[in-house]
Image (cartoon, rainbow, N blue to C red):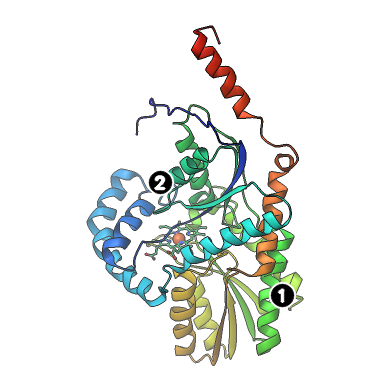
Amino acid sequence: MSRYWLEPSFTHGTAPRTGVLLVNLGTPAAPTPAAVRPYLKQFLSDPRVVEIPRLLWWPILNGIILNTRPAASAKKYASIWTDEGSPLLVHTLRQTGLLAEHLAGAGHDGLDIRYAMRYGAPSIPATLNAMRARGCTRILVLPLYPQFSASTTATVFDEVAHCLQHWRNPPELRLVRDFHDHPGYIAALAGNVRRHWAAHGHPDRLVLSFHGVPRRTLELGDPYHCECRTTARLVSEALGFEPDRVLVCFQSRFGKARWLEPYTQPTLETLAAQGMGRVDVMCPGFVSDCLETLEEIAIECKEAFLGKGGKAFHYIACLNEESAWIDALADLARQHLGSWLEHSPPDAAALADTRERALASGAEH
Ligand SMILES: C=CC1=C(C)c2cc3[nH]c(cc4nc(cc5[nH]c(cc1n2)c(C)c5CCC(=O)O)C(CCC(=O)O)=C4C)c(C)c3C=C
Ligand SMILES: [Fe+2]
Ligand SMILES: [Fe+2]
């Protein structure tokens, strides 16, 4: 769409309102190669995600990756798909509903609370347009990534800004950059582990596995690695578990470059070889279970650990619909909504009236 075409901005008959937009990564529409391909194409064409010059990357993406990976990924998606759809989508949808209920219950009614996906549907532009149609003149954007990374959080901000370039009358905007050390988020993670341990006893090692990014991004100043380490330290402290029995590692390496280390699967294999009977693995960087947790960790890494002689592998689920997490999410939203909760948005209807009278009379506005 051309940026020189600015959309009109009528909000007649709708009370001005404040919106909260949760954003997650996105997921294919179905666990089939035909549905995975366009999703991967959009995802891997984002220059924030793959920082390789387009002239080099384009032939690799279109000539090799998009011809081989969709079929392989579709099989993995099929192994975790539910009757309601992709786990990532199902959890994001439920979290949105629970957050809306929670905030309404706390007296903050009238908020327009929605979710969008950075890749695939519902898209950020389509959702922002729907919020405008509902009269949102203030929007809080809350990416569901606890740790900031240019490849995730920043690209959400880019997409929001790109969309608003086409608006004649854009909303007031607030962005949540990260929540890697939010006390409610840390407490919810520790609560999940404690509950697991109350039922199953303690492991020899607790492995905290985060999604990886290229090592080069750390050298260039991306704070992601440090935020992951901080989250891990805070969770360990909250648990009071001996620090040398907690390991931090990075999963989902993509391509041949060096990524953040240590890598999750080789670390688990080493632990098995060292005679660690039981490991528990949790993925604090994902607030919703998805392909990377349910397939890569709970299936592939489990097989790898047991295959090297490990005796028991426990995967501890993501926060998903945990009430402590919904409390934390509501707290985070409230904290960033701040003054917006105290003062309702300026009355757009009054402005529209003035404008209409001016247009009708042909007078200078
Ligand atoms: C190619 C580079 C990739 C970077 C950099 C990257 C960073 C990154 N990703 C997440 C969260 C998720 N990634 C997911 C899937 C996924 N990730 C990549 C590649 C990169 N991610 C690919 C190609 C895929 C698709 C699946 C596959 O073909 O293997 C998911 C799961 C989506 C789902 O549908 O369940 C999540 C979530 C973070 C947090 C991050 C950087 C911090
Ligand atoms: Fe990823
Ligand atoms: Fe660091």
- CB atoms at circles 2 and 1 under 8 Å apart? no
Q: Is mark 1 within 8 Å of ligand 3?
A: no
Residue at 54% from the left image edge and 12% from the top image edge:
358
Q: Nearer the viewer, residue 22 or 208?
A: 22
Residue at 31% from the left image edge and 50% from the top image edge:
57
**Which mark, by number, is residue 243?**
1
Which quarter of the figure has residue 338? top right
Q: How far, Cα to Cα, is label 2 from label 1?
A: 37 Å
Viewed as shown, does residue 161 lie left or right of 72? Answer: right
**Which mark, by number, is residue 168?**
none
The residue carrying mark 2 is 47
Viewed as shown, does residue 220 lie left or right of 46? Answer: right
Q: Position of residue 163 (x, y in %)?
A: 45, 37
Q: Position of residue 59 (x, y in %)?
A: 25, 51
Secondary element at image label 2: loop
Which quarter of the figure has residue 194? bottom right
Secondary element at image label 1: helix
| Amino acid carrying mark 2 in the image | Pro
Quadrant, the C terminus: top right
Residue at 42% from the left image edge and 75% from the top image edge:
80
Q: Nearer the viewer, residue 27 or 145?
A: 27
Q: Is residue 63 visible?
A: yes
Quadrant, the N terminus: top left
Q: Position of residue 208 (x, y in %)?
A: 60, 72
Q: Is residue 276 visible?
A: no
Viewed as shown, does residue 246 lie left or right of 249? Answer: right
